[in-house]
Image (spheres, helix red, strand yellow):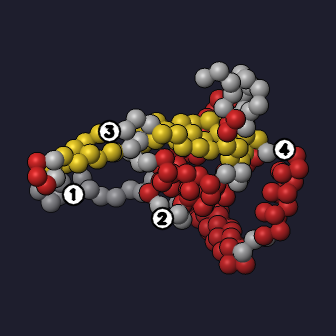
Amino acid sequence: MTGPKLNEGSFVAGEKTGSKAVARWVRMSASKARPVLDLIRDKDVRTADEILKFTTREAAHVIRKVVASAVANAVTNDDLDAETLYVKACFADEGPTLKRFRPRAKGRAGRINKRTCHITVVVGVMDDRRLSIFQSSTASRGVNPATAARRARVERGRARAAAAKDEAAPATNESTEPETTATADTNGEEN
C-alpha cells in the first residue's frame, strides 16, 4: 500500500493513529459486519461494549472481542487509561473467499462462496472537548436510587460484620487456657 489508510483516522503516512486490534479470516461476509461496526464508530469504549452486548447479530460477538482486544492493547502497550478511550475507526475488509460446489440438476454444479473478512478496530484517546462532554454526560446520569440503596445496605452489613468480629475477638482471647480432659483408653480405662 502506498499511502495511509484513511479510514484509520490518519492523514500522514507512517503516523500512529492509536492502538488497534485485527481479527483476520473471520468466517462472515464483510457486508454483514459493516452495519454493526457503524453502530459503534466514534463511541466511547464502554458505550460501544454495551451496544455490542445487546446487539443480536452474530457479528456483534466477534466485534466485541476485537474491541476488548484493542482496549487491552492500548492499556498494556501504550499505558493509556481505558476510561478515556473511544472507537476512533473500525472497518471490515474482505478476506479470501472459500469456493465450494453443490450438485445441481442435469449434472451441473452450483458454486457457493463462503466469504471471510478482516475486522479492524482502532481506539484512541478522546480529546479534551470530547472527554469533558463524556464526563458531564456520565455525571448527569447520576446513581440509580436502587443502586444507592443497595450500596448503603452492603456497607451497613459490612459494618455489622466488622463489629461482631471485634466483639468476638476478646472473648476468644480469654478462653485460650488449655483444658484438661480425661482421655479414654481402648479398654475403657481413664489415664
Instruction: Look at discs 3 and 1 and give the one toward the viewer.
Output: 3
Is the Cβ of the residue at disc 3 closer than 8 Å to that at disc 1? no
Q: Amino acid at mark 1?
A: Ala
Quarter of image, res 70: top right
Q: Nearer the viewer, residue 86 or 1?
A: 1
Q: Nearer the viewer, residue 71 or 87?
A: 87
Q: Residues within 10 Å of mark 4 (few under 14, many from 20)?
A: few
Look at mark 2 in the image and give the residue it sits on: 56
Between the C-alphas of marks 3 and 2, the distance is 26 Å
Q: Is residue 135 left or right of residue 158?
A: right
Answer above or below: position of 76 versus 100.
above
Q: Residues within 10 Å of mark 3 (few under 14, many from 20)?
A: few
Q: Position of residue 49 (x, y in %)?
A: 60, 55
Answer above or below: position of 109 versus 17.
below
Look at mark 3 in the image and give the residue it sits on: 98
Look at mark 4 in the image and give the residue it sits on: 127
Q: Position of residue 92 (x, y in %)?
A: 54, 43
Label located before the other in sequence (3 or 1): 3
Instruction: Look at discs 4 and 1 and give the one toward the viewer.
Output: 4
Label located before the other in sequence (3 or 2): 2
